[in-house]
Amino acid sequence: MKDLTTNDLAATTFAVRASGRKALVAYLMAGYPDERTFEDLVKASVDAGCDIVEVGIPFSDPIADGPVIQAAATAALSRGVTLRSTLSQVARLSARVPLVAMSYINPILRMGVDAFADAARESGVSGLILPDVSFEESDAFRPALTARGLAYIDLVAPTSDDARLRAIACASSGFVYLVSVTGVTGVRNALPAGVTELAGRVRTATETPVYVGFGVSTPELAAELAPCADGVIIGSRLMQLAGDGHPGEAGRRVGDFLAGARKAIDAAADSPERTTTPPAHSC
Amino acid sequence: MSRGRFGAYGGQFVPETVMTCLLELEAAYAAARGDAEFERELGELLSKYVGRPTPLYRATRFEAAIGTRARIYLKREDLNHTGAHKINNCVGQALLARRMGKKRLVAETGAGQHGVATATVAALFGMECTVYMGEVDMARQRPNVLRMRLLGATIVPVTSGSRTLKDATNETIRDWVTNVRTTHYIIGSTVGPHPYPTIVRDFQSIIGREARAQIIQVEERLPSDVVACVGGGSNAMGIFSAFIPDAKVRLFGVEAAGSEHGQAATLNTGTPGVLHGAYSYLIQDENGQVGAAHSVAAGLDYPGVGPEHSMLKDSGRVSYERANDADALAAFQTLARSEGILPALEPSHALAFAKRHFGRDADDNTLVIVNLSGRGDKDMDSIAELLP
């Protein structure tokens, strides 16, 4: 059997699961609302109990993102934020938790896949999510990352059939990103239908932890989702909090929200009737 | 394993959410093309509803006006129902959508011709229709906005980014990702993820098949040159596809060189990258951010191009040339005054190249087909502003 903990990110995600906790992941757009506040937000997220921080790389044409993250990307781009500037900034942060980058493929192609992988490794980034690279296209990018000990994190969706779901879940390293909803990122108020069943299918397919994202907008929703998965990812709601109000207070707003989510997730995980049975694996 | 490549270009750079749908579309298309009933129905719609075949018309007074010795024929796609070549693809894709059980169509539109064609087939097939259109384009192609509304479509103004075709396409993809179970996305050009560039080219290839047969019938020979404008590149792939195997036929794709406000000559000035699901030439900066395009022709105002064109550029089979806003406007006027035909601003770029190129470089053996991909009625507002 292949060793699933060969990269730093997997070491963290498997350790979090072994500890009996559910992971909390914060998505933050690089350089939003400005570069200094972004650093505050990373620190606030870690202090609030996030296990991983996902750093969004701004792109001009983010087809998998809803209005909130689009607007954050546009704002970051207008401030001159780039993939290179983000990697340099991340290197200076020396965050206490793993950072993963989420980027559309074009900025990485422009930099060069190998050059990116080298720079990411040097800056301390431990994984990459490419929302517009299908599983079919991933062969061109996966080896460059995994050869350097970086996780290549695949996404599965409610529309993925069983064969795709199994193939993708087995290929993903670090964690599997489960897209909760047929749609784009955004702030939503209800749990999408079928997400629990979907998460169950993915967890049956792989030993790699499964994290749910897209539309996780309240501590209550995070707590509802956490028992069916190994972690939850919160993005659009954080970017809304970061952008609405004085930047000097953004760290507190985001930190308070995440601390609430942390508490709600931990409470849900402790309640015995909500715990799920350990998954079986077919990889 | 990457699929749907034209040389190095193409592929499927899309969120996982729509991959199953793309696989279904590919299978449905393969099945349809092997089905005599599908071909019969498509052929019948093209002849009885769209009005095909379109004429191949020799523009002798245009020849005289530009002072050329070449014989210049126009492939009159402007005479199709709805006024452009876009309907060829929409009729085919609507039949596919029906086979797949989809009840709703979404489309992006720049000039509005593809939006009108999609709204038209939605009405014909009794489907719901939403069209995304940039605010800038809604203002400069106002008649088409009204036409789409009259046909029962919902028009969603796109206010992000450049507020033109690129951002309308982003918004359509987001709608499709969200409603993929019930909705078919009719992409209007030979762009997007596989299998779209192939499907759109195939449905448009009737232009080239007809033109090839027509020129042989009239002139008893193949043309020396074929000219078409290139935005995303569907009218060009439609006419080029029939002549690509004829190595002696020179093929010219004409991109928009714009003005001092910018340009949209993607193959002439871009570099390869990924936009809207495919790897192809792209106007982008050194950080991989997609640039703003500019053209007086809304249908050419796009920073990407179809992947098959990228391959044809690299192989040298097609020469990609440029015409700017001013030259296109001048060619528009020349054709209007000499032939009594108001071309759309998009094919006015092809006419501008023909005027420049064959006006000085032609002999008695030069036999040209220009694809007149659409009519200019939609452009009256912008032309009224631009002409003295």
Image (spheres, helix red, strand yellow):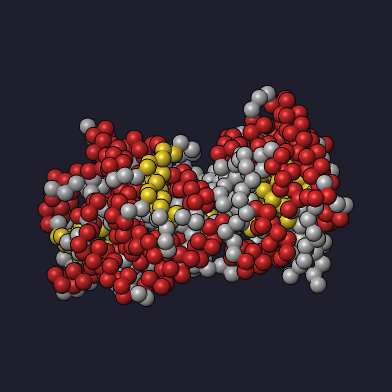
Quadrant of the snapshot with the C terminus of chain B: top left
Residue B59 seen: yes
The one nearer the camera, B383 or B248, is B383
Q: Is residue B36 left or right of residue A240?
A: left
Q: Is residue B371 left or right of residue A208?
A: left
Q: Is residue A53 above or below residue A128?
A: above
Q: In the figure, residue A40 lies in which quadrant?
A: top right
Residue B322 pos. (x, y %): 35, 51
The one nearer the camera, B336 or B165, is B165
Point 84% across, 46% down: residue: A270
Q: In the figure, residue A14 lies in which quadrant?
A: bottom right
Single out the residue that lies furthest toward the front.
A273
Residue B258 seen: no
Q: Is residue A194 left or right of residue A4?
A: left
Point 66% across, 39% down: residue: A217
Residue B161 pos. (x, y %): 49, 39
Residue B99 pos. (x, y %): 39, 65
Residue B216 pos. (x, y %): 18, 72
Quadrant of the snapshot with the N terminus of chain B: bottom right
Point 39% across, 60% down: residue: B97
